[in-house]
Structure formats: structure tokens, C-alpha cells
Amino acid sequence: MSKVHTILDLNDYVKLARELDILGNYEKALSKYKTALKIVTQRKSEVLDLSLKDKWTQVENLIKNEIIMSHEALKMAKTFENDDESRLERARQEEMRNNQILMRDYEPPKEPKENIIKSNKNEYDPRWERFGGLKPFQIWEKGNNPDDLKKPKKDPDVWSPPKNKPKSNYKPNPGFNRERAKNYNNGGKGYGNIGKPNIAKSVPVKGNNEKNIDKDKPDPKIGKSPFYLYHYPEGEGPDGELIEMVEREVMDKNPNVKFEDIAELEGAKNTLKEAVLLPLLMPDFFRGIRRPWKGVLLYGPPGTGKTLLAKALATQGKTTFFNVSPTTFASKWKGESEKLVRILFEMARFYAPSTIFIDEVDSIGQKRGDGDNEASRKVMAEMLVQMDGVSGKLDQEDISIEELKKNIVMVMGATNLPWDLDDALRRRFEKRVYIPLPNEKGRKEMFNINMKGIKVDNNIDMDKLVKLTDGYSGADIANVCREASLMQMRRELMKTGGKLNFTKIKLNPSASLINELDAPVSQQDFETAIKNISKSVSQNDIKKYDQFTQEYANN
């Protein structure tokens, strides 16, 4: 009774046959393939469904193709086995034929064999003694001189080694010598005594070539700031470019802005003078619990003079002013942004007393959340650490007045969105001052300040202009004054056909034309400008500022 095979048996036979094919055992592979083919034929005969019978036919054809490939591989392997001995025999015959061709024209030398062997010890081979001691595979030139047979012919493609080898200054390292180390201090060839700095002695050199090279090299210390040389006395350092960038783009030693140039805001001015200027004038009084504030936050609607107040403080107190924007700390290199924050505060301490003004501080110190990236978190963390470190020495009671002045660094921030600030950063700004929109008195002063140097009609109703600009910021009023001052020029240049008369300017670009255009600004000009320029702050924003002031302001 024949054994009944399953589909799993068929799968095992085919897998085993393929593995044997890979290993090169083609005869056993063929036997496994044939067993698998019998199983397929048997299963095919038992199936009545035509669709299943077609599938078994496809499997049968696949196995037959693999059997044919195994037969071909077996034939090729047998041909290689039969040809091994014949190929070796053909190689031996070809080698002997080549040797006969090489020695066909050879004539033995007239000198005795012993002389040849002695003169050519390196070329002598006892296996080729019958050919005069020379290897038959060497090529030589035949000539009248019998010594020519001993000289191998030079191959033009092979270069001969140099006769005089170039001298090298390389000396191998002798390694550690304990005896030399013992005698290191006893007048040996060491570079100096142990425990003392290594001072190399200058060796005189003939000629002035090397001296000229040293003189032509520019001194790296030239053009460097005191802060740069304080950190890198040699004039070069790893963070040199960052230091130069901060000094070039951020530092302003004299902003040249006075409090008189800022209209109204008397309460904010007095608060800032007490927080910033008095510690500079009376440093001995402001110590301990009376130490200066760590930071001052100026918040309010845009265009109300927050930046001008910071510059006026720096000018009045004669401090070094650092005007920082969010792009100052932006860098494409990892770790460079927080390094810029550290350099900024170190530079502020070096040039103290100084003021660091961070405009739009909310873009740097937004509330931290899960969506923040690593770079912004590191910049924020570094800023918080540096702001706490600024007043570290100011808390000490026994600090001298000179050191107190050198460590006074005021950090001021300005923002239009104070409610977006991080809680930790808001705590560092211990003094929070609200800069509101100008009132009637302030708007009147702004008109007078902005129109200084401009001809104005004597019949101007300033009270009416103040009422019309209710809710306008300082920047809005400056735009109104600029627009009104250009009205007369537009009227003069648009007289011909309603278009700008540029031909008149080309023909008569003299002072008389400028006098015609520089007419006094009238009441109508101001009212027209107010109609053209609307206020930029809404009432909803004012409500937000009032709510934040009630919760967090302390001015």
C-alpha cells in the first residue's frame, strides 16, 4: 500500500530540493524534485473541479521547469570535473614550449661555471645549472661581449631606484628614558627646569626672511574692544565673532535721547528715575533690601514711547545701552543662541553701569508649553539664569561702592502683549510700568514737539485738534503731523492737470521753489490729515491692558 502524501510533504520536498541545488548537490535535488512531481500528479488526478485542476497543472509545470534547470547544472558540473586533468596537462605542455623558445638561441659562456656563479650569486639558481646558472625567464641582450649575458635587459616601464636617497629629518621617538628624566634638571638638553614655565630661547637666523614674515603679519589685537581683549588677551578666541557681532549691532554707548523729548508720562518717568537713576547717584544707599530692581517691564499699546523712555534713561544715567531685538539671539548653529545671551550679560557687566533693553520681549519669553522647541527653551532658561545672576553681588551688605557701580545692570523690557509673558520671566521684571495712551495734555505737547522747525499758521485751534485725536497714540499723532506738513507741497505740484508737475522741478530746482513749497501748515491741513489717518489702537485692547494692570502692575 503506497503512502499518502499531504500538501505539507510536497512543500518540504520542494524546499529541500532547492536547498540542495544551492549547495551544488544536484543528483539528490533531482530525486526530491521527482518525488514532489509524483505527489502533484497524484493530487491532480484525484481532483474533479476544473479550476483546482488548472492550479495543480501550473504547479506541475513549475516543478518540471526546475527539474530541467537542475539537469543543466548537473551536466555543466560534470564537464568541469572531466576537464581538470586535461587543463593541467595543457598548462605543463605550454610551459615547456615557452622554455624551449627562450633557450633556443642560447650559447653557453666561455668563462668557467664557477666564475659565473661567483659573480652572480643573487641570480644563480641550482635548478637551472645546465643553463649556466641563470634563470631562463630572465631577458638579456646578446652581443659580442660575453658580460652582456649577465646583465638583464632593463624594462623601460619600470623606473630604477634613486642612487642618492633624499635625506630626511625624521628621527624615531626613543620613548621614555628614565635616566634622561632623572638628569632633566642637571644641565641636560631639556627645555627648562621642572615646575617652571617652558621658555624657548630665540635662535638667530641668517637673513631677514623670517623677520619680514613676522612683521608683515597683522597684529590680531588691533581694532579689538576692551571686552574682547579682557577675555582673549592674544586677540583671537573661539567666541570672537559673537562678541564682535554683539558690540556692532547691539551696544550703543550714548543714545542721545532726553526726557524733555518725551511728552507727558510724568508718572512713568518718576517711577523709572527712582528705579534706575537713583541707584546710580546714591549707590551706598541702595544695597541689601534696598538693592536696585532686577528688571523693569514697560507695557502698553504700540507707539506710546516705551523705547524712547528706555533710551532717555540710558542717556540721563550715562550708562551703556544695549538695544536687543528677538533676531539678536537667532542663529542657525545649535547652542549659539544661548551663548549670545550669556555674552550679552557678561558684556553688560563689563561695561557697567549699563542698561539692557529688550524690545518685544514677549517674542522671546512666551509662556512655555509642550509645543516649544529645544532652542527656544534653552534661550529662555539662559535669560532667566542671567537675570537672577545680575543682582547676585548687589544683595551683599559689605560690597564696596566701586564694585556696586560695576555690577549695576538694569534689564528693561517692552511689550505690547504682556499677558503672553512666561510667569517666571514676569517675576524677574520686578517693576512693571503701564505706558498708556496720551491724554489731552500729552497730545498737545506731542503736536508742539513734532511741529518743531515747521512753519505753522498762527490761527491753529490746538484744542480742537486735541479733541479730534482722542484715542490716538504718539506714533499716530506723529503720522498726522507728517501728513499735514506735506499738504502744501502737494497742492503746489498738482496745479497743472491734477498731476505732479515734475517738469517744473527739473526746470527750476532752486531755493525759490523750495520757499514756495514750504508754506505754513493751516488748520485745514491738520483736519484733512486726521481724516486720512485713523487711530491704531482699539477699545478692546485698552480693556485688556486695564485688566492686566489691575492684576500685575506695581507702578
Image: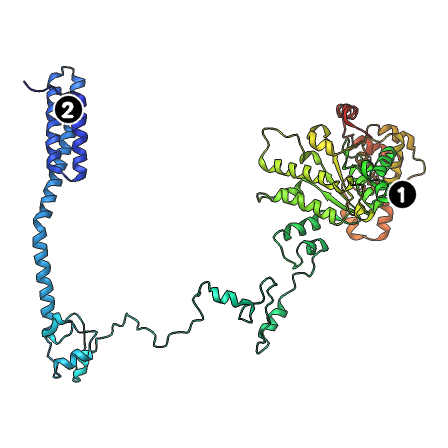
Identified at 89% across, 43% down, the residue is: 455
Depth check, mark 2 against mark 1: the one in front is 2
Q: Nearer the viewer, residue 160 or 491?
A: 160
Q: Which one is nearer the viewer's eye here, 92 or 291?
A: 291
Q: Is residue 262 left or right of residue 251?
A: right
Q: Position of residue 540 (x, y in %)?
A: 75, 23
The numbered disc on residue 467 is: none
Considering every residue shown, the one lying at the far right of the view is: 458
Expressed as whole percent of the image width and height from the top left, the position of residue 522 reads: 89, 37
- Element type where label 1 sits in the image: loop
Count of numbered circles on the image: 2
Residue 132: % across, % down:
12, 76
Labels 2 & 1 near each other (Cβ < 8 A): no
The amino acid sitting under disc 2 is Thr
Pointer 1: what residue?
455
Q: Position of residue 452 (x, y in %)?
A: 88, 43
Graded by Cα atoms within 10 Å as few (under 14), some (14 to 19) or many (20 or more), the crowding at tag 1 reads: few
Q: Quadrant of the C terminus?
A: top right
Residue labelled with disc 2: 57
